[in-house]
Image (cartoon, rainbow, N blue to C red):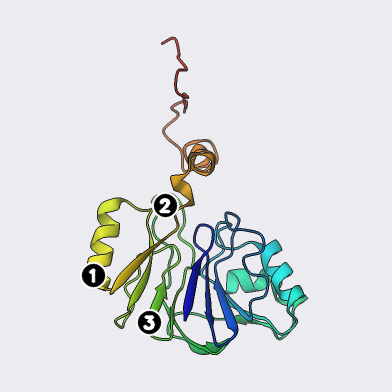
Amino acid sequence: MQLTKKGHACVRLERDGRTLVIDPGGFTEPEAAVGADAILVTHEHPDHFSEAQLRAALEASPAAELWTLRSVAEQVAAAFPGRVHTVGNGDTFTAAGFEIEVHGELHAVIHPDIPRITNVGYVIDGSVFHPGDALTVPERPVDTLLMPVQAPWSKLAEVIDYVREVKPGRAIDIHNALLTEDIAVPVYNRMLGPDGPGIGGAEHIRLGSGESLAL
């Protein structure tokens, strides 16, 4: 199969003229899922699930289908009857000619005060594993691990130990849009501000290079 990295956590897999796309989200190119025969989504967070992108892809290809967990399926199923399938840990199915296994159940812990949501990972053809937003160890060996390298819920030591535990032949970076400042700053400002879990009443201030503050 041919793997093409798209923005952030999205990849396209192609073989024998058929295309499978995983996690086209808000940090992904708008056309990333267009032309796909099948789409997989790991969870509902907007950097992995863009309703506009899914609708565009499903409308562009009337035979295309979506496999995802319930929280995502419920948002788009009514518009595409018979084409949206709900999956969970342990399920197996065929999508666009690829054999898929579902591994994992929960999103990684961002902060103990933030409720955990459902997250599933996908093993494709017994070879490639996309874990979504979790460090799930699949219950089988894989050749290629799509490795979330940076997220509000991870640290580098955990990523290193995760790859050591999975023992893939190769690890390919995904979930890396937050390494760019223009995307990272709004995300971390939100997490450290009033919409996040709270930082004990402290005022959160971000100074740009050269900016100063009287203390």
Question: In the rendered structure, which disc, 3 or 2, sits on the residue that comes first in sequence?
Answer: 3
19 relative to 99 in the view: left or right: right
Nearest to the eye among marks 3 and 2: give it: 3
Marks 1/3 in contact by CB < 8 Å: the verdict is no
> Could you say where residue 80 lies in the image, as x and y percent from the top left?
74, 78
Marks 3/2 in contact by CB < 8 Å: the verdict is no
Q: Quadrant of residue 62?
A: bottom right
Observer-nearest residue: 23 or 11? 11
- Which mark, residue 31? none
Q: Which residue is mark 3?
A: 127
- Specify the amino acid type for callout 3: Ser
141 relative to 107 in the view: left or right: left
Name the residue at 55% across, 67% down: 23
- Specify the amino acid type for callout 2: Ala
Crowding at label 2, few (<14), some or many (≥20) Cα neighbours within 10 Å? Answer: some
Name the residue at 45% across, 13% down: 213
**In whole angstroms, how far apart are the C-alphas of marks 2 and 1?**
19 Å
Crowding at label 3, few (<14), some or many (≥20) Cα neighbours within 10 Å? Answer: some
Q: Quadrant of residue 103?
A: bottom left
- Which mark, residue 165? 1
Q: Which residue is mark 2?
A: 151
**In whole angstroms, how far apart are the C-alphas of marks 3 and 2?**
24 Å
The local secondary structure at tag 2 comes to loop
Observer-nearest residue: 100 or 188? 100
